[in-house]
Image (tube, rainbow, N blue to C red):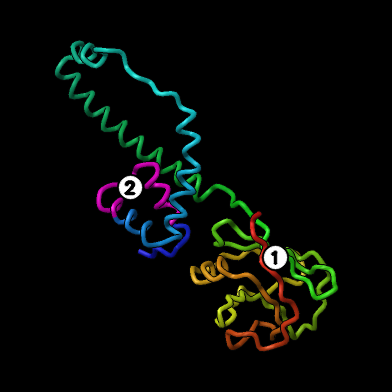
């Protein structure tokens, strides 16, 4: 199982917090949360999401002797039918919990945060870059007029610092916007980076995996206040 997959981590964290992750799978996820910061952060996000719902529901306690009175009125054959009913109810509860996890992880729109404004020195911005809170996705929006020869392209890079090589985030659009999902390596490096850069490359991007043309923009990463 690839625990570096952000969607899988979100689904596991949701199932853990809702309570449908059981036995050995639950213990494995608890160990993963202790050893992996991304898994622990996913669990905390789910706890933050569901805590307000739990607090909003008032506790309901059955009256004294309620269950005994109910059992006294049920014939033995009805008890057997009731047992089957409770099994179905438990299964329905699990399905409902999984649907809740699916809705909040798969169908919920991502929450975008500012990441960087890309502009050459003394010029108007050309692109606005946003990211999701978990650094799993980015959106690049063209906000200026991009002029570049047809045999060239602009490529966006993470600058990890610490003497490590730049890592590509892909080509930048000449107009409109694009949406991109990031690999686990890109996510980790982007989360720790202070800057991104833009270089001029061949049409399909750098052939070497590193900037080969002139670096025309170095921009700071925006951080939540």
* Region in magenta: 9-27
Q: Residue at x 70, y 88 (%)?
A: 213
Q: Name the residue under label 1.
A: 116
Estimate the x, y position of residue 108 in percent, counting from the top left: 55, 47
Please tell me the numbered disc located at residue 198: none
The N terminus: image quadrant: bottom left
Pair 1/2: label in front: 1
Secondary structure type for disc 1: strand
Estimate the x, y position of residue 157 in percent, counting from the top left: 63, 76
User: Counting other residues with Cα less than 10 Å from the Cα at mark 1, is it few (<14), some (14-19), or many (20 or more)?
Assistant: many
Residue 123 occupies quadrant: bottom right
Of pointers 1 and 2, the one earlier in the residue sequence: 2
User: Counting other residues with Cα less than 10 Å from the Cα at mark 2, is it few (<14), some (14-19), or many (20 or more)?
Assistant: some
Q: In this view, does 43 lie to the left or right of 191?
A: left
- Predominant secondary structure in magenta? helix
Depicted 183 relative to depicted 55: above or below? below
- The answer to whether the residue labelled 1 contacts the one labelled 2, judged by CB atoms less than 8 Å apart, is no
Please tell me the numbered disc located at residue 21: 2
Task: Give the spatial CA distance, label 1 vs label 2.
Answer: 38 Å
Residue 179 occupies quadrant: bottom right
Depicted 66 relative to depicted 1: above or below? above
Residue at the extreme left: 76
Secondary structure type for disc 2: loop
Residue closer to the observer: 77 or 143:
143
The C terminus: image quadrant: bottom right
Q: Residue at x 79, y 64 (%)?
A: 143
């Amino acid at each position: 199982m690839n625990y570096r997959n952000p969607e899988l981590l979100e689904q596991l964290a949701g199932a853990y917090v809702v309570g449908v992750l059981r036995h050995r799978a639950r213990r494995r996820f608890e160990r993963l949360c202790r050893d992996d910061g991304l898994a622990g952060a996913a669990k905390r996000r789910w706890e933050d999401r569901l805590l307000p719902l739990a607090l909003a529901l008032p506790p309901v306690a059955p009256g004294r002797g309620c269950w005994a009175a109910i059992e006294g009125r049920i014939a033995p054959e009805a008890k057997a039918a009731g047992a089957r009913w409770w099994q179905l109810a438990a299964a329905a509860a699990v399905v409902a919990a999984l649907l809740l996890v699916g809705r909040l992880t798969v169908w919920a729109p991502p929450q975008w945060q500012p990441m960087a404004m890309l502009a050459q020195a003394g010029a108007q911005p050309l692109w606005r870059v946003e990211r999701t809170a978990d650094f799993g996705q980015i959106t690049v929006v063209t906000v200026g007029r991009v002029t570049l020869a047809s045999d060239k392209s602009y490529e966006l890079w993470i600058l990890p610092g610490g003497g490590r090589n730049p890592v590509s985030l892909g080509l930048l659009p000449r107009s409109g916007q694009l949406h991109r999902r990031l690999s686990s390596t890109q996510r980790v490096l982007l989360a720790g980076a202070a800057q991104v850069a833009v270089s001029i490359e061949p049409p399909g991007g750098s052939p070497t995996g590193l900037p080969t043309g002139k670096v025309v923009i170095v921009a700071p990463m925006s951080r939540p206040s």
